[in-house]
Each structure stands twice: as structure tokens, then as C-alpha cells.
Image (spheres, coloured by chain):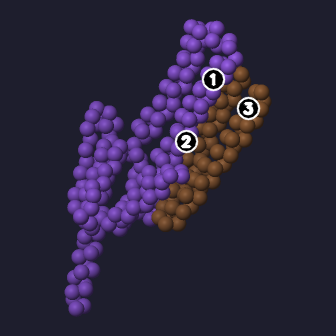
Chain colours: A purple, B brown
Amino acid sequence: MSKYQDQNELIVVKKHFIVLFFRILRLLIVLMLLFIGYLAFQKYFPLLISDKSINYLIFLVIIVILNYEFIKLVLFLVKYYNNLIIITKDNILILNMLLVTKDDLEVIDPYKITKIDEFSRGFLSNVFGYGTLVIEQQGESVRKFRLTPNPYKIIKILHKQRQYIVQDRRKKYIINNEEI
Amino acid sequence: MESTIIIIYTILFIVTYIFIVKRLSMLNDKHYEHIWCNYLKKSNKLVVKLITFTMLVQYIISVFIIITLL
């Protein structure tokens, strides 16, 4: 489970590692296709390859696609390690950051959560243990967290946290009533 | 021709790398100030290492292609 617990009782959940695996696989497939494509072009169109302008064009296409895919992987690494659900004692923080275009931090009050669901559909999601976590809040839109690792454990943690928060608020409420 | 392209590519590559790493550290510090989560510091170090490795591979393959195709 991509979960981390530190001294401040924070639980950090990031997306399942399979997302990263698929991204790397995609890069490897693109590299392989470029290599095979160039070899095939060399074999079937040897006269075209000998032409300098066409050779430059092929070079340009290969270098642009290659660098695009690598930069996409780098940006994906940033996204993967900075797209987090952080469960603290009192709140649920949702950090969603991309390098230049996005920097969101959302704070959810567990007291306002009305429903927590989990969907794990498909062969891969059941084998590798990931699913969609759905959090419904009072009067607000439904939040979906796709590709969350071990959503059952997270639901358990969220329920515990909610119980603690509810008890804490009740205590405060009773004390306030007595004071009045 | 080859050497000029390699030099231009290297300069662009270094600028991109520095921009990504600096921006990432800056955003990470900002988040750490708000959340106080040690995980962010640890993950940032790991991300920087992974990015360095990925970009190094990118550079080596690109230079190899420049030398081979041109």
C-alpha cells in the first residue's frame, strides 16, 4: 500500500504504483516503435533515407517524439508523487499539484462526510488491489479518487477518524451546554 | 552541424532540468509550510532522483540519436 505514517499521525495515500508502471511501459513501447519504424523505413525505402532532407525530417520526428515522451514521464512523476490524500487527526487534505499548471489544496472536514464508498471493478484492479474511493459531503459534490490502493483500509481509517471527530465535537457540545 | 545541435540541445536540456527541479523544490517547501508533513520532504528527494535519472537517460538516447542519424 502506498501509505506513509509519520510522527504527527498523518497517513499519506498516493495512487497505485500500476499507474507509474503503465506510464513507463508506454515510454518503452514508444521507444521500441521508433526504433522498429526507423529500421523498417531503412529496409523498405533505402533511397529515401539516402536523401539528406528526408533524413533530417526523420531525425526531427524521432527526436521530438522521444523528448516529448520523456518530458511527459517526468511530469507524470511529479504528478504521481504530488497527487496525495493526506489523512490527519482532524482533516482530510487533498493535494493535487502539477509543475506549472495546477496547485490545489483542499481541506475536507470529516464531520461533513455523509457517505464513503469503494468500487473495485475489473480484473487488474481486483488482482492488484486498487479501486475508486468515493466521498460524499453534505451539500457538496461527490469526490472520486481513482486508482486508490487498498481502498478498504482507507475506508476503515476514515471511519475511525470520523468516529473520533464526532466524539470530540459531542464532548465540546455537551461542555458548552453545561456552561450555559 | 552535429556539435552545434548537441550544444544547443545540452543548453536547453540543462535549463529544463534546473527549471523543473527548482520549481518542484519551491512548491514542495510551500506545501510543507502548510501541511507539516514529513512525507513531502522525503518524496521530493525521491522525485528529484527519479527525474535526474529519467532525464539522464533521455539525454544519452537523444545524443546517441543525434550522432547516429546526422
Label 1 resides on the chain identified as A
Pointer 1 residue: A57
In the rendered structure, which amino acid carries the disc numbered 3? Ile
Question: Residue A140 versus residue A77: which sits nearer the camera?
Answer: A140
Q: Distance between the residues labelled 3 and 2?
A: 23 Å
- Residue at 57% x, 13% y: name it: A41
Which residue is at a point 63% across and 8% down the rendered structure image? Answer: A46
Looking at the image, is mark 2 or mark 1 earlier in the sequence? 1
**Residue furthest to the front:** A53
Q: Mark 3 points at which residue?
A: B5
The secondary element bearing badge 2 is classed as: helix
Image side of residue A16 versus residue B42, left or right: left
Label drawn at residue A74: 2
Q: How far apart are marks 2 and 1 (CA)?
A: 26 Å
A110 sits left or right of B2 in the view: left
A87 and B18: which one is in front?
A: B18
